[in-house]
Structure formats: C-alpha cells, structure tokens
Image: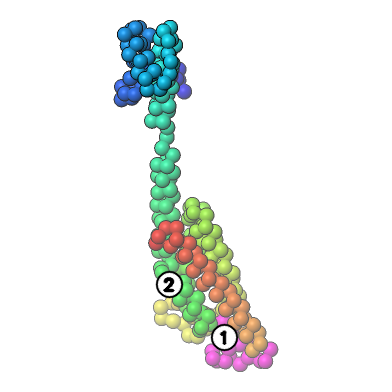
Amino acid sequence: MSISKIFSKIISTIFPEFTNKLTWAVVAAGLALISSSLVEQIIRAAINENLNWNLTDGNDAIIGVVLISLGLLHNYGFVREKNKPQHDQIAHEKLDRELEHDKTIYSKLNEYIEEGYLINYIESILTNHSYTTKESEPLDYFYYEGNKFEYNFINFQINQAKDELLESFKNFEDFKSTCFFSHGLNRSDGQLYMCMHPYWNIDRGGYPTREEDKKYDDCTKKLIQLGELVQSNYKNYRSKVKSALAI
C-alpha cells in the first residue's frame, strides 16, 4: 500500500465523515465545552440532573477531552464498520459463481447422456445381453470427457458421485470388451451387433457344453452386478445434482 493511501486511510479514520452526524455532535460539544464556559455550565447542569453526577467546576477541560475522545472512537467504529467488506455478500457472490460453473459442466456432460439414457442402456444390456455399437457411442464420449479436469465440479459431493459413476462405468465397459463379440450378419447402417459370448448362448445359435453353459451363467451374474452398480451410481450422481443445483 502506498504512503498516500495509508495517510488517506488515517485521515478518514480520525476525522469524522460529514454523514456521521453523531460524531460531529459529540466532538463539537467537546470543543465547545472546552472553549465556552456557558456551554460548559449547560452541559454540566444537564448531566447532574439526568445522571445524578456531581460535577464541580474545574472539570470542563476533562469533560471536553472525554467527549472528543468518545466522538473520535465512535467515528473510528463507524468508518471501520462502513468500510468493512460485506462478507455475506462476497460469500453469496462466490456461491453464485460456483453454482453457475457446476450447472454449465452438468449441461455439457448431459449432452452425451440425456435424462434416462444411461439407465435404459444398461437395463437393455442386462435384459438382452446385447447392444449395438451406435448405442454405446454417447456413453463413450461421456466417459472420456467426464474424466477431463475441465469437467470437474466445484461441489465436492457432485464431483465425487461423478467419479464413482465413471469408475463403475469403466469396469462395466472393460467387462463388455472381454465378453461381448460381434454377432450376426453385417448391418446396412454399419453398426455392429454385439452379444455376450454368442457361441455359449443357445438363443444366439450356439451349442454350449455344460462347462460353457456354467461359464455363461457366471458371466451373466457378473454383468448384472456391474450393470446395477452403474445404475445405482448414476442415480446417486443425479440425486446430488438435483439437491445442489436444482436441475
């Protein structure tokens, strides 16, 4: 801070502001008390009558100094309070900025998975043990973008819920990459029809052995476990967003 600013701050603290009428009145009374015997007598009489104080002659200078001191102390408190940062307002503005940031992040991520899309996608796979590559594309974007630092939420609970969702989704996708394979004729739209171990599934034209049939059942249990965890984590993420951002 420069010397001129320090000097200006001291002056503004010591000398009363024009709008601070109480300080002006007290200081003026103190000065008048010191300089005018008539005013001194009037003030002394008022104090003696209202406060039952017995002020004798000779106290005029002391009374004047006390009044001036009280006036300057009041002015110091007045200036300090007036110039004090409005912490509630600052905190409120900071919260508004954080909410706006998190709403923007959510809107961008939600472009990849619209309301209900992820839940329905997982449910379809758990039911049919199959999906098309086009169905999974939006979720791939959601996963890759959601892991970028720029898509972190400021709200800790939302960001934690998002990370848990992404982690569970990654585990689900890793399982799919090892247990789902292209099946059927080539599609005219260029998509691939992906099925879980089609050669272990009689509904896909497979002829599984007893051992392969047991392996398929184990894969089904794992698929359900991972898929339901993704659904649960998405609901938790969505709940945190709703609670904090009212979206």
List x then y, in percent, for residue 112: 43, 65
Which contiguous range is marked in magenta? Answer: 195-212
Q: Nearer the viewer, residue 166 or 202?
A: 166
Question: Does residue 171 appear left or right of residue 13 in this picture?
Answer: right
User: Residue at the location (41% across, 81% down)?
Assistant: 188
Dot 2 or dot 1: first in sequence order is 2
For marks 2 and 1, give the CA distance. 28 Å
Q: What is the three-letter code of the residue carrying label 1?
A: Pro
- Asked which secondary structure carries label 1, the reply is helix
Looking at the image, can residue 108 be seen?
Answer: no
User: Residue at the location (41% across, 78% down)?
Assistant: 189
Q: Nearer the viewer, residue 94 or 71?
A: 71
Classify residue 169 by image quadrant: bottom right
User: Residue at the location (54% across, 89% down)?
Assistant: 204
Q: Nearer the viewer, residue 59 or 151?
A: 59
- Read off the residue under disc 2: 116
- Read off the residue under disc 1: 198
User: Residue at the location (31% across, 8% down)?
Assistant: 38
**Is residue 224 located in the magenta-colored stretch of the structure?**
no
* Picture quarter with the C terminus: bottom left
Q: Residue furthest right?
A: 211
Vertical side of 238 occupied by 14: above or below: above
Which circle, 2 or 1, is nearer the viewer?
Answer: 2
